[in-house]
Image (cartoon, rainbow, N blue to C red):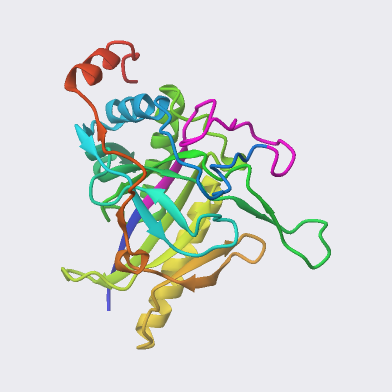
Amino acid sequence: MKWEVVIGIEVHVQLLTQSKLFSNSPTRYGASPNSQASIVDIAMPGSLPVLNKDVIYKSIALSKAINAKVANKSVFARKNYFYPDLPKGYQISQYKHPILSEGELHITVNDQQKRIRICRAHLEEDAGKLVHENLFGYTGIDLNRAGCPLLEIVTEPDMQSAAEAVAYLKKLHHLVCYFDICDGNMQEGSFRADINISLKPSGSSTLGTRTEIKNMNSFKFIEKAINFEIKRQRQLLENNTAIIQQTLLYDSDKDTTVPMRSKEDAHDYRYFPDPDLIPISIEQKVIDDFYQTLPESP
């Protein structure tokens, strides 16, 4: 049987701001562990989030880069899940009402141009970081990154090969750096991608079960991870073995994907509007005026 590859990508872009999404803590990389975590970032009782206005302008800049619509009204929601480096037990994100929608990028692969649809880009806060080095069997938690502002940019499942995925990511990376939205420093985690992959019978309109390769920050390893996962899924399907919907990590030393956890669906997170944050309202004049300050798109 012939198979068609289906790839969608979620990119987490850390916004180039001086302070975090909902607190005045600095966002400098490389500071001593837990030295840049305020009472808001560590979720002390009684502390309340206050939106950083700069993230609105970074979002508007991204809308120009990807030709997306800016929502005149968007809403923050609580995304509930437990992870050791998520102090509140939930993440402030956006769900039904993201700040950007209906964008696109055009890529060229093998002299063929292709349009990649971007369904949404939403604001959310980053989690902290688990630290394993030099702790002799223990795990440490560094909350310096907790609360850093992210834009999560989500495509439709429009890519069909590793080459197309890498071409899309390289172009997006170039644009977010060009417009000063992000510093693009992949080794520091400022630009990282989650790759969703599935296979379906050639000509079928029904998508297959997808897996997600999490937190990829190297174009070279993204290409290798996608090619490995395509091969792995094809072998399973041809042996009449079901694909398990799960989140994977890529082991670059062994060139293999490794299961991390089962993959959740949206209802598992129990989203609801955050009661501590009012909706974001952006007048069209603000958008138009800010566009005038931006350079011409490359």
x, y percent for residue 8: 33, 55
x, y percent for residue 239: 39, 87
Residue depicted at x 27% and y 56%: 157
x, y percent for residue 297: 32, 20
Name the quadrant of the C terminus.
top left
Q: Is residue 248 visible to the viewer in this orientation of the structure?
A: yes
Q: Is residue 171 above or below residue 129?
A: above
Task: Farthest residue to the front: give it.
Answer: 46
Horizontal side, residue 272 vs residue 230: left or right: left
Between residue 216 and residue 145, name the one nearer to us.
Answer: 145
Q: Is residue 63 above or below residue 169?
A: above
Q: How many marks?
A: 0
Q: Is residue 17 above or below residue 150?
A: above
Q: Is residue 111 visible to the viewer in this orientation of the structure?
A: no
| Residue 41 covered by magenta stretch | no
Name the quadrant of the N terminus.
bottom left
Residue depicted at x 53% and y 39%: 190
The part of the chain drawn in magenta is 9-35
Between residue 131 and residue 105, name the one nearer to us.
Answer: 131
Between residue 54 and residue 164, name the one nearer to us.
Answer: 54
Quadrant hosting residue 122: top left
Residue depicted at x 23% and y 27%: 282
Horizontal side, residue 179 vs residue 111: left or right: right
x, y percent for residue 66: 29, 32
Between residue 189 and residue 99, name the one nearer to us.
Answer: 99
| Residue 29 covered by magenta stretch | yes
Horizontal side, residue 229 vs residue 77: left or right: right
Residue depicted at x 75% and y 39%: 32
Q: Main secondary structure of the magenta part?
A: loop
